[in-house]
Image: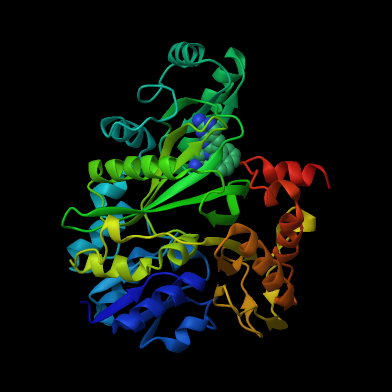
Amino acid sequence: MFRRLLIANRGEIALRVMRACKELGIETVAVYSQADRDQLHLRFADETVCIGPAPSTESYLNIPALIAAAEIADVEAIHPGYGFLSENAHFVEVCQECDITFVGPSAETIALVGDKVAARELARRADVAGVPGSDGPVETEAEVLETARQIGYPVLIKAAAGGGGRGMRVAEDDASAISGFHSARAEAEAAFNNPTVYIEKLIQRPRHVEIQILGDMHGNIVHLGERDCSLQRRHQKLLEESPCPVLTEEKRREMGAAAIRIAREAGYYSAGTVEFLYDAEGNFYFIEVNARIQVEHPVTEECAGIDLIKEMIRVAAGERLSVTQDEIKLSGHAIEFRINAEDTTRKFQPSPGLIETLIQPSGPGVRWDSHAYQGYRVPPHYDSMVAKLIVHRPTRREAIETAKRALDELTVEGISTTAPLFQRILEHSDFVAGEIDTGFIDRFFSHT
Ligand code: MV4
């Protein structure tokens, strides 16, 4: 096992990784930007290193600064958390050249699944259905029209280097397909330095259902069930739950097996997620692989009773997975609420600033993953998430009641948060019935 590990992240995930390291007996090195001197996890680190000014391009994304910190602090491994450099194949290669173990998949796997056109081909080789669409990229107007007419409108034009909804265009007819093709290409070129786009049939009102996988370097791959992440706003997830309220045991097995085939085809090790769209008829379609630990991993940890961060670290050290598929027993229902410093009455405008009062929920069935404390100032430079409230109960109904109770206990003064919105969602009859899809939040706000 590693003696010493650097955490190349901030906020709650830096603290979460540090907690796993402590329990594994690994020394920790925390890095921070000049805006993050008061990060909670710095107080628990064996060593701390300032890596640059507030902008993340100069700190948490600054590869030379991170490698220098790793060399000076003499670490054996780097855990990237999520976001920042977590899916940067070049960073993984640099770590490798410096003899530092990157806690995550190989550079090859990250590069492969980061190309969504290549990932679609990978899924097909793994005998998993993607959304009906183009074979590979579409390069000309003629190809766009031919593909769109063949699969039938409406279609979605997506960037090969995109993911998470960036650079997508809906087209209802030939004219919007042509204009969408050009604007998607321009946006993809500007955002990712890669204009490649592809086309899929638009799945109307899908659920977003993703399968958690874990693999090791010895060819073992397991899945840990699904998360329903349908409640999103502008591709930002608000709430995630496991299990998906409508998935049958048979579908879960089918989707789990499909995710494992995709992971095997990608040479996947470490923790990862295979995303699917799930339509009203119960069909599922592969869309993307996320080659990182995700924000919403705790709902899976609660239902599976497995520490995903520890598994990632052990796997990176060359160890075998601690469990086989047969040993994984999912139980109960977990829901995660992202407590963001945002004003939901002002279009989710960021609300950074001083947390004057913080009383955090606890008690049976409640987990609180957060770096926030009373007197902490949420900086304006980064993601607005300040906490994740996770509840785990035997049934969904009980999880909802525990969540209401926990959100009632939560008291935050000084900044606005998304917590009051969740109280209203938990009262909504469609949510209570499990009738959610990716359009829920937009409909919710169009009625208020
Ligand atoms: C889709 C789709 C409908 N049809 N693809 C958005 C994020 C990215 N991961 C994929 N996304 C979508 N892809 C087809 N062919 C609808 C979405 C989508 C969405 C997906 C999951 C959760 C929320 C969403 C909100 C809007 C659109």
Residue 57 spot, x, y in % from top left: 46, 61
- Occupied quadrant, residue 404: bottom right
What is the total number of numbered labels drawn onto the structure image?
0
Compared across the picture, whether 178 is left or right of 111 comes to right
Tell me the quadrant of ligand 1: top right
Q: Please state the horizontal and vertical placement of residue 196, each as a whole percent of the image.
A: 41, 30
Q: Is residue 166 visible in this depiction of the protein? A: no
Q: How is the image coloured?
A: rainbow
Choose top left, top right, bottom left or bottom right for residue 259: top left
Q: Please report the residue visible at 47 percent of the width from the left and 17 percent of the height from the top.
A: 144
Q: Indicate the position of residue 96 as horizontal and vertical percent values.
A: 20, 62
Horizontally, is 1 left or right of 406 in the view? left
Q: Which sits in the foreground, 355 or 370?
A: 370
Q: Residue at x 63, y 82 (%)?
A: 376
98 or 78, which is in the foreground? 78
Q: Quadrant of the N terminus?
A: bottom left
Q: Is residue 406 visible?
A: yes
Task: Indicate left or right for 78 with 399 as reference.
Answer: left
Q: Residue at 24% across / 63% down in the picture? A: 321
* Furthest residue toward right: 448
The residue shown at (31%, 65%) is: 312
Residue 277 sits above or below residue 97 on the image:
above
Q: Nearer the viewer, residue 291 or 364?
A: 364
- 275 w.r.t. 373: above or below: above
Where residue 316 sits: x, y (%)? 24, 65
**Which residue of the protein is positioned furthest toward the left in this rendering?**
218
Residue 202 or residue 102, whichever sits in front:
202
Query: In screen coordinates, is 108 left or right of 163?
Result: left
